[in-house]
Image (cartoon, rainbow, N blue to C red):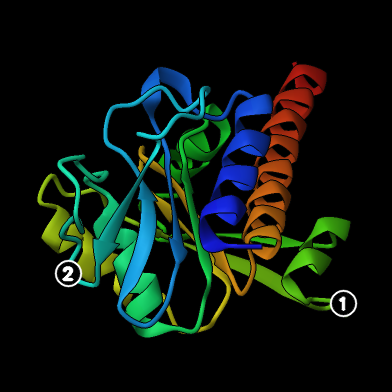
Amino acid sequence: MSALLDITHIKERLARNNHFPGTSGNLGVRIDAHSLYVTTSGVDKYETTDTSFVKVDMDGKPIDTDLVPSLETVLHLEIFKRSNAYASIHIHTVANNVISEVYGNQGYVEFRNQELIKAFGLWQETDVLRIPIIENPADVTILAELFGEHVIQDSGVVLIRNHGINAWGKTTLEAYKLFEAAEFLFQYHLQLAAARQYINN
């Protein structure tokens, strides 16, 4: 399967789950050592057309097109320059925004004794999943620098405070798996906190 088909498949899967509110969110997939596909800025991602994706170079500049790549292409570039990852997903949800704000001052959120941390390769009873949370400066160059500090493996996730999550992996399916597992953990944590609050009252 080609990179374009791969990214189209994962976009449509995310779209079926309503993960692109207000044209938000974006994707990146490596074509080769010199280029990648990213989602086009401002387009409706619930539809797939010939303007859905832009081919860009490793500086984020469009190749042979007038289409404008997502502003957050810089995040995908950090991943592809710093790792051997193939795919990157950047998605805004209520759960990941709330979690990133609740734990933003701490700079991370941790999960333990949860089945879904196994998606991250954590199988022991004492294992702890720590997801970094970075600030969200308006200057995307600074954002990319903050983000890049946490790209230390070929797969992983990072939360951007009140902005969204980036998940990446060696395949599109791995990137999606990590995104989906993280979102489950966020939603579980928030619902558990709400249930405890209700019981205690």
Q: Under tag 2, what secondary structure?
A: loop
Q: Residue at x 46, y 28 (%)?
A: 45
Q: Position of residue 188 (x, y in %)?
A: 75, 38
Q: Position of residue 72 (x, y in %)?
A: 27, 50
Residue 15, located in which quarter of the rendered image?
Answer: top right
- 156 and 114: which one is in front? 156
Look at the picture and state if 117 lies above or below 189. below
Specify whether 184 is left or right of 80.
right
Look at the picture and state if 172 lies above or below 47. below
Look at the picture and state if 83 lies above or below 146. below
- Quarter occupied by the C terminus: top right
Dot 2 crowding, Cα within 10 Å, few <14, some 14–19, many 20+: few
Tell me the distance, in whole angstroms, between the alpha carbons under discs 1 and 2: 38 Å
Q: Residue at x 39, y 72 (%)?
A: 79
- Quarter occupied by the N terminus: bottom right
Q: Which mark is residue 70?
A: none
Q: Residue at x 45, y 45 (%)?
A: 100
Dot 1 crowding, Cα within 10 Å, few <14, some 14–19, many 20+: some
Q: Which mark is residue 123?
A: 1
Q: Amino acid at mark 2?
A: Asp
Q: Amino acid at mark 1?
A: Trp
The residue beneath circle 2 is 59
The answer to whether any part of residue 17 appears in the image is: no
Q: Position of residue 26 (x, y in %)?
A: 41, 43
Q: Position of residue 149 (x, y in %)?
A: 32, 77
Decide which of tag 1 and tag 2 comes sooner along the chain.
2
